[in-house]
Amino acid sequence: MAFISTFQFKVDRKGRVSVPAEFRPALTKPDFAGVIAFPSPHNRAIRCVTAAWIERVMETRDPLEVFGSGTADLALAAAADMVRLPFDGEGRVLLPKPLTDYAGITDSATFVGRFAFFEIWNPEAFAAHHGPVSAAARRAITEGGGNGRS
């Protein structure tokens, strides 16, 4: 299942926010129902992945690398900042303060589908980031006759 589209939800005073119902089926496994969250390495947002994604990353690692002293790759570096966010009975997760502080999220959050993962943004920050990108994409489609090429 691909994470697509954009949704905005209120964050309650305890830091809980509803995860879009469209995203939840991909986030439920027999051993864990929720998301794995960490600071996005590319944006001031919270990146969220599935438990299955984590398992795929682990399968691609060399089991002997635990004995190495080379530089850690981005996935290994991110592991230290990852947090499991289980669903409550209403499909909400509790966003930890360090992550909301990093992303600047206070009373509202924008969920942004990115196909294999999704991000949670401060709504104003996402609008500022996405507006120019979206406008450029629309221009490219319009000017290129709908095929995305100029």
Image: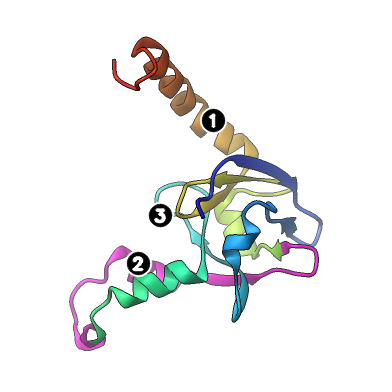
Question: How far, Cα to Cα, is label 3 from label 2?
Answer: 10 Å
Horizontal side of 6 relative to 14 (left or right) equals left
Which residue position is annotated with label 1?
Answer: 128
Question: How far, Cα to Cα, is label 3 from label 1?
Answer: 18 Å
Q: Residue at x 62, y 55 (%)?
A: 23
Q: Residue at x 68, y 51 (%)?
A: 20
Kindly check if marks 1 and 2 are in contact, taking CB atoms under 8 A apart as contact.
no
Can you tell which of label 1 and label 2 is closer to the viewer?
A: 2
Please state the horizontal and vertical placement of residue 141, each as a whole percent of the image: 40, 18
Q: Which residues are magenta?
A: 64-92
Horizontal side of 119 relative to 8 (left or right) equals left
Q: Residue at x 70, y 65 (%)?
A: 94
Q: Amino acid at mark 3?
A: Pro
Image quadrant in which the C terminus is located: top left
136 and 72: which one is in front?
Answer: 136
Which residue position is annotated with label 3?
Answer: 41
Q: Quadrant of residue 136?
A: top left
> Which type of secondary structure does the marked residue at label 3 adopt?
loop
Q: Identify the disc placed on residue 75.
A: 2
